[in-house]
Image: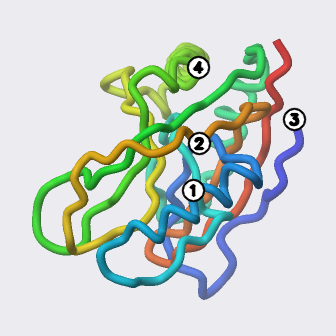
Amino acid sequence: MTLLFEDATPAGDEAPHNLYFALRPDAEAARALCALESLRAAPGRPMDPDRLHISLYSLGLHRRWPRRQIVDAVQAVGSVRRTPFLVELDRIATWGRGLGPLPVVAWSEEGVVGVHGLHEVLHQALAGTADWRRRKPGIEPHLTLWRDHGRMPETFIAPIRWRVREFVLIDSRYGQGRHELVDRFPLTG
C-alpha cells in the first residue's frame, strides 16, 4: 500500500475533503463523453475529462484530512481481487429535482453489472471498518457529465465503453472543482 498523498490539510486550505472510491474512463471514453457536450441545449463550461468518474463508495466529507481512517480503508480494500470488466453507458438524462442546475448523467441498465459487483466487494471489505459503514449497500452507477438549468429527457446515445482495469480513491475538494488522486488499485482477478 502506497498512499500518494499523506500529509494533513495544508495551512490556509480549508476546503473540505470529499473522499470516495471511483472508476475513471480511459482516454478514448473520456473524449467520447466530452463530445456529448454538443447535446446541451445552452452552451456552457466544457467538461473537464480529468473529473469524469463513476462513484463506487463514499468515505464521507471531512473538514480535515482523516489520515488514520484513510489508511484503514486503503488496507481494507487492498486485498480486493476482481478481474477487469467492461462498462458501457448508453443513455443520458437530467437526474434530480429542484431549482438550480441539475446533473445530466450518462448511465445504463445492463452495461454496469461489473460496477455493481465491484461495489458489493468494496462494501463487504469496508463493512468491518466502522468508520466507513454505509446504511444502504446499493448504488445507481452513473457518470455526471455537466450541470444544467434545462432538463434533458432520457436520450439514447451510441454506447460509450471502456475496460475497467483499476479503481481509485479520490479527494474531491468540496466547492473547488478539484480532484486529487489519493491511491489506485489495479483489478487483477
- Residue 60 against residue 16 in the figure, above or below: above
Counting residues from the start of the chain, the first of labels 1 and 2 encountered is: 1
Counting residues from the start of the chain, the first of labels 1 and 3 encountered is: 3
Tell which of 16 and 130 is nearer to you: 16
Spatial CA distance of label 1 from label 3 is: 32 Å
The reply to whether dot 1 and dot 2 touch (C-beta < 8 Å) is yes
Indicate which label's residue lies in the foreground, 1 or 3: 1
The reply to whether dot 4 and dot 2 touch (C-beta < 8 Å) is no
The residue that label 2 is drawn on is: 160
Residue 114, numbered label: 4
User: Which amino acid type is marked by label 3?
Assistant: Met
Residue 6 at x, y percent in the picture? 79, 57
Spatial CA distance of label 1 from label 4 is: 19 Å
Counting residues from the start of the chain, the first of labels 2 and 3 encountered is: 3
Dot 4, crowdedness within 10 Å: few (<14), some or many (≥20)?
some
Spatial CA distance of label 4 from label 3 is: 24 Å
Tell which of 158 and 89 is nearer to you: 158
The residue that label 3 is drawn on is: 1
Counting residues from the start of the chain, the first of labels 4 and 2 encountered is: 4
